[in-house]
Image (cartoon, grey):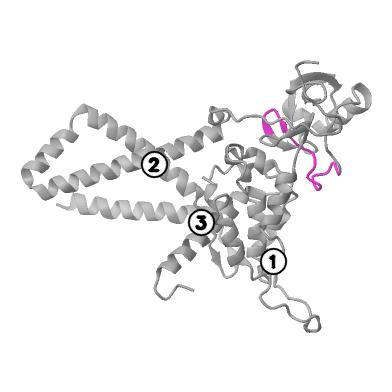
Amino acid sequence: MPPTVALTVTRYRPERESAPTMQTYEVPFRKDWVVLDALNYIKDRLDGTLSFRWSCRMGVCGSCGMMVNGSPKLTCAAFLSDSLPGPIRVEPLNYFPVVRDLVVEITDFMRKLKKVKPWIIREDERPLAEGEYRQTPDELDRYKQFSMCINCMLCYSACPIYGLEPSFIGPAAIALAQRYNMDSRDEGGRERLEILSEHDGIWQCTFVGECTKVCPKNVDPAGAIQQLKLTGAIHWLKTLLPWGRG
Amino acid sequence: MSAESHYTPYHPRWYRRRVSVWWWLQNRAYAGFVLRELTSVFVALFAGVSLWQLRALAEGPEAYARFLARLGTPLFVILNTVAFLFILFHSITWFNLAPTAMVVRLRGKRLPDWVVVGMNYSAWLVLSGVVAFILLRG
């Protein structure tokens, strides 16, 4: 087992340089350390100016997503021991503008999440006195997978379509839309389909499928998008029928 | 200072990386995806050849014999072999992706992926069997 491992980390200090550079740090190797532990070691002991986002360090908050050796990963779940002998390349998430070092700009992503109307839409709200909307375990099962998303944006970094067409709504936002579409309490499917059928929606996706592979929560955004395409295509076919209009 | 920079204190100045035109060579999954997209050219080619065959058939036995002779030339044999390999790749990759796009539920429970894939392959086998039967019967 090596005593230390090298981490080559992207540095971008907009007040000093116009393009990112790489900096290498030597950190102690420990079997139970993940890349995030190594970054925190650098920040605490070697170079306090290194900037990166993190919070829960247990795969729940979705803040510590970065490119580790070229693949989008939650750094709190990427063990150093899986990337030996090193050096381990740590870069900011692909396709997002870089604010500083490993920190990316996410306003565009937050706007896209909101655009798909991720809340329960009802045609008629039931009065409170009538009680809650009940759901069977089978009904819960239909959307539960899509509700596990932690907004870590790894899927966006794995999606070349998002890289080439930044206006693409993207995997996580579409999976979130499908999460509400599949909810038995929701009646907003048609409304969301209209938003998602626009130029920047589901039809931009060419089914590369990498979003699903990199998802740390097994959400399957690629599945959500293809299922929505099927719904959209069936809906369009129905409008062609004389009795299907309206 | 590594390069000239126009920085206003406390104002963000984002760095945007451009996507290289060679992005699809960065990893195997991307390359496989582009290859799968390319197979559509060969699917179109096969469709074109089939239409050409139909036209030859409609024009009579002589035209059809000419068509068959043309298909037998080395150029067409090579082209068709390559096209066939691409179409196999096309069919297999798309069949394997089918369960992602199609969620089949039976009594409220989602059928496992291998069942959906298996049904696709079975349909492929049955249809190929029927075609082979029709062609080899006489």
Going by the picture, which residue comes out furthest to the bottom? A129
Instruction: Kindly indicate whether the residues beneath marks 3 and 1 are on one polypeptide chain.
Output: no
Please tell me which of labels 3 and 2 falls first in the chain: 2
Disc 3 chain ID: B
Q: CA distance from mark 2 to mark 1?
A: 38 Å
Q: Which residue is mark 3?
A: B115
Residue at 91%, 21% in the rendered image: A46
Q: Residue A144 appears in which quarter of the rendering?
A: bottom right
Residue A3: x and y in percent read: 85, 19
Residue under numbered circle 2: B40
Label 1: state its secondary structure.
Answer: helix
Amino acid of disc 1: Leu
Is residue A127 toward the left or the right of residue B59 in the image?
right
Task: Check disc 3 and give the amino acid type.
Answer: Val
Can you identify the residue that label 1 sits on?
A: A140
Q: Chain of mark 1?
A: A
Could you say which is closer to the camera, residue A62 or residue A112? A112
| The quadrant where residue A58 appears | top right
Distance CA(mark 3)–CA(mark 2): 26 Å
Describe the element under mark 2 as helix, strand or loop. Answer: helix
Please tell me whether the stretch drawn in magenta is mainly helix, strand or loop.
loop
Q: Which residues are magenta?
A: A56-71
Circles 3 and 2 in contact, beta carbons < 8 Å: no
Expressed as whole percent of the image width and height from the top left, the position of residue A50 reads: 86, 27
Q: Residue at x 20, y 50 (%)?
A: B135
Q: Are marks 2 and 1 in contact (CB under 8 Å)?
A: no
Asked if one can make out residue A2 in the rendered structure from this viewpoint, the answer is: no
